[in-house]
Image (tube, helix red, strand yellow):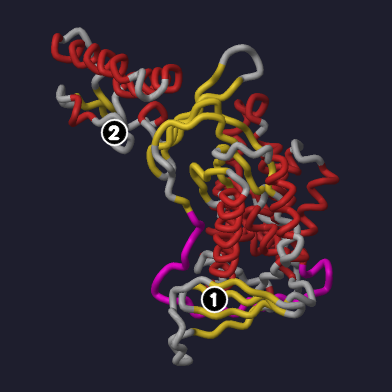
Amino acid sequence: MSTQSLVGLPKYRSSHHHDIHLSTCILIVQSLQWTTSIVTFCDPHMASTNCITELVSMCSVFKCPISDASRYISGTMVGTMLASYASSVGTVIDWSEEEWPNGRYTGALVLEPLMGLHHDVSVLDVGAMYPSIMIDANVSMETMRTCRLDAEGSTDAVNDTVVDWDHRLVYVQADGLRSQVLRQPVGIVGRALVHLIETRKRAGKKTPTGWALKIGTNSMYGALGSSTSRLQSFSGASAVTAIGRMITILASSLAKAMGFATIYGDTDSVFLTKVSMNHITVQHYLNTIHLVLLHTPFRSVKMEYEKSFDSFISVKPKMYYGTLRDGTEGTKAEVKGLAPVRKDRPEIVRRLVSEVCKHICTYGADAAEYGVMMLVSDDTSKIESGEATVSTISRSRTRAARVCPVSLDMRRIGLA
């Protein structure tokens, strides 16, 4: 087989037209070897994990080779996906690089949690928050005009976040930048996102293609906020997160006005509990916030009810323990950030923290004090007497893959 037929090059009569550099041949062979190794690895697990189907679906959606899809090079994949879409609609993309400041843009807003035990906590979530904001605000490389506040000698506070709009523009001030986003015509990023969302509805959300389309939709913001991506736009990513923070603050403020307390809030979700004696329900709250958003450009941002916790222990940002009804007479626990779900904690600590949290949720904070003391005392006695095995009081170092013993002092082990 000739070199030309192997790599798909046309066969020209003139020899100088088909000269191939050695480095190019090496890259082609390495790509083929990588693809072959992926297929070989996945074949025994194909029936149980469906990985081949999902990889092929990602290649189809992102218009990329399987070597990129298997390593999930998101910046490159989103670039090829957007370039393919732009070509299909006859649009040229501005790939020019944007000058990035030294610092990072401000991310999502995480509300300070109300620490302690709470009951009847409802979790409300905004689905596809950042893609919805990018569509509604028309955030795209060619729709934004940005200037630095310090460069123009502005007397405004450089780090203040301001979001405003009129019939023609969306104005965003954040991270020392002031941006104006044209609401019309629709940018290439917004058009591509609408295309991905509509295609996913037709393909089915639970199909491999629907799964790949969801990844493509959610990856668009990540590519926008990465300096190594072809889509890179510091001002665009900063504007999207600024609008997201505004929506989170709006959700929390409206909840307070309607008789709810915001127990916790993180990026696209809020945790609410009723503190007022009025008859306003969570559904009333959802209807009201949607009516408010209808008077903004961000009309496709939809907050939905996700779940309710019977009991909820809030510890710190991204750390909580809650009990939910599982559809039967029993309950199940949901833990985030605490010892029971952390592999860097010894088994005895993971079990103890789970038992302590369950005891507090069952009997209440005050009534559970004696029981918690007994649980801690019991495990401390097991360690001091040698009854606890080495494996239960040891933890694994993930990188070194070694097990090392942990101090017998419970205070040094740490319960969180």
Q: What are the residue bounds of the magenta stretch?
A: 86-109
Query: In terms of depth relative to the viewer, which is nearer, 243 or 367?
Result: 367
Which quadrant, please, contains the C terminus?
A: top left
- Mark 2: which secondary structure? strand
Q: Identity of the amino acid at label 1? A: Gln
From the viewer's perspective, tell me whether residue 337 is left or right of residue 92.
left
- How many C-alpha atoms fall within 10 Å of the one at disc 2: few (<14), some, or many (≥20)? few
Task: Please state the horizontal and vertical placement of residue 287, each as a whole percent of the image.
Answer: 74, 48
| Residue 315 part of the magenta segment | no
Q: Which mark is residue 397?
A: 2
Q: Is residue 22 visible?
A: no
Residue corresponding to mark 1:
173
Task: Please state the horizontal and vertical placement of residue 393, each as a whole percent of the image.
Answer: 24, 20
**Residue 81 occupies which quadrant of the picture?**
bottom right
Q: Which residue is drawn at the image coordinates 75% and 36% (left, top)?
A: 206
- Closer mark to the observer between disc 2 and disc 1: 1
- Mark 1: which secondary structure? strand
